[in-house]
Image (cartoon, rainbow, N blue to C red):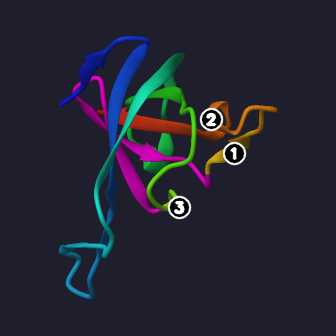
Amino acid sequence: TVITVSGGETVRIKPGERLDSNQNPVQLPGTEFDIEDVVIEPLGSEEDGEYGRGGTITRIRIFADGPVQRPILATDVVEARGHTWEIEGFPDDWRDEDPDLSGPVITASRRLG
């Protein structure tokens, strides 16, 4: 669930899942936490023909101010704007002269179809 706050939106970072030897999803260890007052930039959608299937992939970029509760991992997922998004790679670091304005920049995607 996304909560609108003054100056931005709130997203939730959660540990992702992996498949066990029986191909069942298993939750990875870690803690969930919210990041408030983020800016979300839509990056658009494109056709996704991965694995011979048709579908669409949509991407967003999330800019967060200030330090976060724990490092964000490439295996984490982010809940934003009512959807669960896969984090693509490791977040970049936005650096500003004011440490409160520095923080992670996350690129995330979700697939449909």
Q: Report, in whole angstroms, how far the alpha carbon at label 1 lies from the one at label 3.
A: 11 Å
**x%, y% of residue 83?**
26, 31
Q: Report, in whole angstroms, how far the alpha carbon at label 3 lies from the one at label 2.
A: 16 Å
**x%, y% of residue 86?**
41, 46
Q: Residues within 10 Å of mark 2 (few under 14, many from 20)?
A: few
User: Which residue position holds label 2?
Assistant: 100
User: Which residue position holds label 1?
Assistant: 92
- Is residue 4 depicted above or below 102 in this figure? above
Can you tell which quarter of the image residue 31 is in?
bottom left
| Stretch of the chain drawn in magenta | 75-90
- Which residue lies at the image location 37% right of the left edge and 50% below the top edge? 77
- Which residue lies at the image location 48% right of the left edge and 47% below the top edge? 87
**x%, y% of residue 97?**
81, 32
Q: Main secondary structure of the magenta part?
A: strand
Q: Amino acid at mark 3?
A: Pro
Q: Is residue 44 visible?
A: no
Left or right: residue 57 compared with residue 23: right
Residue at far bottom of view? 21
- Picture disc at residue 10: none
Q: Report, in whole angstroms, how far the alpha carbon at label 2 lies from the one at label 1.
A: 16 Å
Left or right: residue 37 compared with residue 63: left
Name the N-terminal-most of marks 1 and 3: 3
- Picture disc at residue 71: 3
Callout 1 secondary element? strand
- Asked if the residue under mark 2 is in contact with the one under mark 3, i.e. CB atoms within 8 Å, the reply is no
Residue at far right of view? 97
10 or 15: nearer the viewer: 10
